Amino acid sequence: MIGSLFVTGPAGTGKSTFCGAFKDWLIQNEYDAIIVNLDPGAEYLPYEPDIDIREFISLNEVMSAYSLGPNGAQIVAADLLLDNIEKIKSKLELYDDYYVIFDTPGQIELFSFRPGSPLLVKSLADKKAMIAFMADSMISQTPSGYVSEKMLFGSVYSRFYVPMMFILNKIDLIGDDKVKEISDWEDNPDLLYDELRNENTDTVKDYFLNIINALKDSEILNKIIPVSSKDSFGFEDVYTDMSDFFQGGEDTDTMYKDD
Ligand SMILES: Nc1nc2c(ncn2[C@@H]2O[C@H](COP(=O)(O)OP(=O)(O)OP(=O)(O)O)[C@@H](O)[C@H]2O)c(=O)[nH]1
Ligand SMILES: [Mg+2]
């Protein structure tokens, strides 16, 4: 693989849709890419996976083998991912010059907060791993919602310590002015601080204001990539970030790749 992008984020933020649409965009721009589905519980996927964990793990079989309901089975299935690393790796050997996009289980905790996941990422991709954190635009519209997304982003970072991008997905739902406002918070955390202080003025929120101060000096506040997977918007920026990391910024100009 050239590099791998593990796509994570809260349930329903658009991980699977992003994986499918971004792979299509890469292929249209003449980059080879595949998708690995790591969600054993996925009933429907908006793309055809090139490698699919459901070939090796069946949620129904886990439910009957361990006498579990669907939620318990999801947790056991997530932990069983580790037992299947070698099978996935042998399939990945066919894709040397490819970008590999990993779609991860719906609920963020099944990937980011299971004990074996850092080992999974290291074994599958080692230093070629990057994480795309999908934040929901609707939640990120308010200062407190935005801070909560950043805290979750920081929590995921603390589990893996690999380069991450903060993707603000579904921007088609909030419009350009809101996207600009959110980008301004990222560039100027003092603005975010003041706006959070004025939000619901009767609530005590020293804790959250202190979090903003702590984030200011960290790489958690750094950059956001606004995306609409529905409109295939923002993918060039995702690609640029990815190739900056994997190839030191070479070959980032998709328009003139073959010139
Ligand atoms: N408007 C809009 N809707 C989107 C976008 N991306 C995804 N969606 C919708 O959001 C819903 C959830 O998308 P999924 O791709 O299944 O999200 P997910 O994070 O993979 O969901 P789980 O794996 O079930 O947690 C679907 O109805 C998508 O059509 C987007 O960019 N804009
Ligand atoms: Mg999904």
Image (spheres, grey):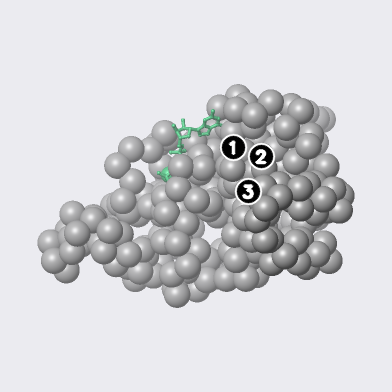
Q: What SS does tag 1 mark?
A: helix
Who's the residue at 67% across and 61% down the image?
204
Who's the residue at 47% across and 57% down the image?
108
Which of marks 1 and 3 precedes in the sequence? 1
Q: What SS does tag 3 mark?
A: helix
Compared with 3, 227 (above or below) is above
> Which one is in front, 50 or 145?
145
Callout 2–callout 1 Cβ contact below 8 Å: yes
Across and down, in percent, residue 244 comes to 78, 51
Measured in 3D between alpha carbons, the distance from the residue under mark 3 to the one under mark 1, in whole angstroms, is 9 Å
Residue flagged by tag 1: what amino acid is it?
Met
Callout 3–callout 2 Cβ contact below 8 Å: yes
Locate the C terminus and report the quarter of the image it occupies: top right
Q: Is residue 5 left or right of residue 41?
A: right
Compared with 156, 94 (above or below) is above
Who's the residue at 29% across and 67% down the image?
76
Who's the residue at 59% across and 33% down the image?
170
Q: Is residue 114 visible?
A: yes
Marking on residue 145: 3
Q: Residues within 10 Å of mark 2 (few under 14, many from 20)?
A: some
Marking on residue 192: none
Q: Residues within 10 Å of mark 3 (few under 14, many from 20)?
A: some
Q: Is residue 7 left or right of residue 63?
A: right
Measured in 3D between alpha carbons, the distance from the residue under mark 3 to the one under mark 2, in whole angstroms, is 7 Å
Residue flagged by tag 3: what amino acid is it?
Gly
Across and down, in percent, residue 159 comes to 57, 71
Residue flagged by tag 2: what amino acid is it?
Gln
Q: What SS does tag 2 mark?
A: loop
Disc 3 residue lies near ligand 1 with CB under 8 A: no
- Residue that badge 1 annotates: 138
Marking on residue 141: 2
